[in-house]
Amino acid sequence: NNLSDDENVSEEMPTTPGLTSHRFSQELSKRVQDHLLESIQPPGVDGDKWQLCAEEGKMKMYTRELIRDGIICDPLKAIHKIEKVTAREVCHNFWLSDVRKEWEGSVEEFRVLEKLDDSTVIIYQSHKRIWPSAPRDCLYLSSILKIDNPPPTANGHEAHDTWMVCNFSVDHAEANPVPGCVRATIEVALICQTYITSPDDRSDAIRDHITCDIVYVASINPGGLAPASFLRPFQKREYAKFLRTFTTYVQDKTKDKDVSF
Ligand code: 18C
C-alpha cells in the first residue's frame, strides 16, 4: 500500500479498530467507539445542549459553550449531506496527507512524524498565525477506518457503508513544544455514510444516485486565553469555511472518476 497514492485507496484498511496493533490501538479503539455511540447522534436527542449556530444549505452547525480552566473550548458538531460522493472518498481525502494543503486553509506547515500502520499516522502541524496572538501548533494521531457494524441511523434508512477519520492529540518524542508557539489540543472525528438513492431520473451513472451524510465533530483547546468576543465568531466562521471548502473540493476531485466505495 502506498500512502502517497491518492488514486488507490488501500484495500487492506482495518475494518474494525484494534485489528492492527500499535501503541495507540487501545486508545484509538476507545475513541472510535465513543464517537460511534455519541458523536454520530443527531443533535437534539437525549436533551443534549447543542445549539444551532449556523445553517447553510444542507449544512447545520451546532455548538455548546464550554470553558476549561478559563479557556474557551466550545465543541462543534456539524451535519451535512453532499451529493455524488461516497463516504470512503470523503474520508480518504480528509485523511490523506498528500492533499491536505489543497483544502486545509488553517495550516502553515505539516509533517508526518510516524506511520503506525497503513491507515494511521502521527502528524505535526503549525497553523497560520492570527495576529496579535501567539502562533499555534498541534500534534495528533490520525486514523481512517471502515466501520462494519454502525449503530442504526436516526433517519431510519440503512447506510450502504460507513467510514470514519479519527484525529486526537498525542505526545511524540520528535515534536517537543516549540518556544513561543502555543500547542493546541484536538479531538476531531469525521463520520461519513453513503446512501444509494433509487433512480428517479434517466441517468444511469451511479455517481448521480449517491449521497453522503457527514457528521463532523471537533473539540479544540486553543491552549491559551483568547477573548470570547473574538474566538466564538472566529471559530464559527472558520469551521463553516472548512466544511464548505472541503466538501466542494471532494466533489470537484471525484466528479470525473470511477466511484470508490
Ligand atoms: O479538522 C480539520 N482539519 C484537520 C487537518 O488539519 C485536523 C485539524 C485540526 C485543527 C486544529 C486547530 C488548532 C489551532 C488552530 C489555530 C487557528 C488557525 C486558523 C487560521 C485561519 C486562517 O483535524 C479542519 C479544521 C478546521 C479548523 C477551523 C479553525 C478552528 C479554530 C479553533 C480555535 C483556535 C483558536 C486559535 C487561537 C486564537 C487566539 C486569539
Image (tube, helix red, strand yellow):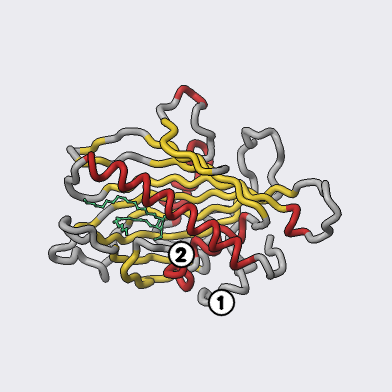
Where residue 140 sits: x, y (%)? 35, 59
Looking at the image, residue 133 lies above or below residue 254? above
Q: Amino acid at mark 2?
A: Trp
Residue at the limit of the structure toward the front, as seen here: 57
Please name the residue shown 47% across and 52% down the image: 243
Helix, strand or loop for disc 1: loop
Residue at the limit of the structure toward the top, as seen here: 47
Left or right position of 193 against 133: right
Residue picked out by circle 2: 103
Q: State yes or no: Cβ of the residue under disc 1 lies below 8 Å from any atom of ligand 1.
A: no
The picture quadrant where one finds residue 250 is bottom right
Check disc 2: other Cα within 10 Å, few if <14, some if 14-19, many if 20+.
some
Where residue 203 sits: x, y (%)? 82, 57
CA gap, disc 2 to disc 1? 17 Å
Please name the residue shown 65% across and 56% down the image: 86
Q: Earlier in the sequence, mark 2 or mark 1?
A: 1
Q: In this view of the protein, which residue sits in the foreground, 154 or 103?
A: 103
Q: In this view of the protein, which residue sits in the foreground, 113 or 239?
A: 239
Q: Amino acid at mark 1?
A: Asp
Looking at the image, residue 126 lies above or below residue 247? below
Left or right position of 143 against 131: right
Left or right position of 55 against 195: left
Residue picked out by circle 1: 5
Please name the residue shown 49% across and 39% down the image: 55
Left or right position of 160 against 88: right
Where residue 179 sits: x, y (%)? 13, 65
- The quarter of the image holding the C terminus is bottom right
Q: Specify whether residue 30 is in view.
A: no
Check disc 1: other Cα within 10 Å, few if <14, some if 14-19, many if 20+.
few
* Residue 128: assigned label: none
Quadrant assignment for ligand 1 = bottom left
Helix, strand or loop for disc 2: helix
